[in-house]
Image (cartoon, rainbow, N blue to C red):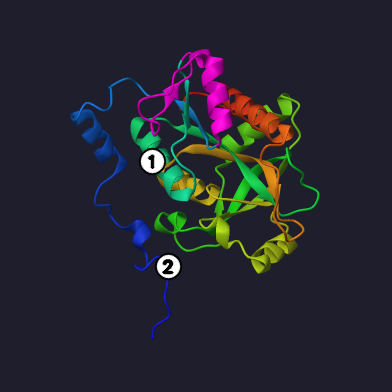
Amino acid sequence: MPTASYPNFAGKHAGQALFTAADFLAYLRQVGALDDEAAPGGAVLCYQRSLYDHVLRAEGLEPPRRRDLPLPLPSTGGKVGLLGQFGIGAPAAAAVLEQLAALGTSAVVSVGTAGSLQRDLQPGDLVLCEAAVRDEGVSHHYLPPGRLATAPAEMTAALGTALRESGLAFRPGVSWTIDAPYRETVEEARHYQAEGVLCVEMEAAALFAVAEARGLRLASAFVISDSLADLVWSPRFHDPAVRAGLIGLYLAAVAALMALPES
């Protein structure tokens, strides 16, 4: 039998899509589920409910009708929007990023958590992702075959500057993006640890691929929330250092987006 390949159709990243995010947004407008208000120029993606609720309280906002569309933040004069509680993982993140691009949002920062693969990365430590191992499905539908998806340089540098100006220490490096958190194996963790990969998460490679395909400015950063560094799972999601790290990352993300020149 022939060896299976992924995706099933070689070269499909260059093919024409049957429908696009712009088509979906047009449908939402047709049925009255989307207003014609201008989209914010920048947006923050967040995945943790605690951070999302914290921002809503700080901004005096109610949860939006649709959580896959940006909620403008009053503190930024509507220049930056928030998306949260839209799901986790590469497919969900890629879908909302496509919709942001179709709305006209050109700069995005993804703020999430990750599991450490290195013993010197502890809960609450920050990682600025420069590239991600493509061990998920989404990126392979957007880019030619390859091992890594690379972070867009401009937004990643801007986020790094904002973190330094906020006095927040961070580690730049490579993450491992995977679709199946319950299938992270000991052998894989040992392999990527030896290669110097810093952490494992579920979105970065897909986001970088969509950003490259759509010409978006995008950065991705994580707070270490658990560890696989000793080849056993050590969860620390509720550690106060993780919550503090998420808030710090979020504030730096907004600052970085606000400091960008208009595209």
Q: Name the residue under label 2.
A: 6
Magenta segment: does it hold 50?
A: yes
Residue 161 point in image, percent of width and height: 68, 30
Residue beneath the point at 54% across and 58% down: 134
**What's the magenta region?**
48-77
Give the secondary structure at mark 2: loop
- Residue 69 vertical placement versus 97 (above, below): above
Disc ID at residue 131: none
Q: Give the distance between the C-alpha atoms of the residues marked 1 and 2, in whole angstroms.
A: 22 Å
Q: In which quarter of the image is residue 222?
A: top right
- Against 127, residue 12 (above or below) is below
Estimate the x, y position of residue 165 in percent, counting from the top left.
72, 25
Work out which residue is located at the far left of the displayed protein and give it: 30
Chain-order first, disc 1 or disc 2: 2
Which amino acid, mark 1?
Glu
Residue 260 in view (yes/no): no
Relative to 242, is 112 on the left or the right?
left
Q: Which residue is drawn at 49% across and 48% down?
A: 89
Determine crowd level at label 2: few under 14, some 14-19, many 20+ residues with C-alpha closer than 10 A. few
Q: Which of 91 and 155 is in front in this view?
A: 91
Where residue 234 appears, as percent x and y from the top left, is: 72, 51
Q: Where is residue 106 in the image (x, y as percent from the top left)?
A: 44, 32
Q: Residue 98 carries which label?
A: 1
Judge whether residue 48 can be spotted in this image. yes
The residue that appears at 47% across and 35% down in the rendered structure is 85
Q: What element carries label 1?
A: helix
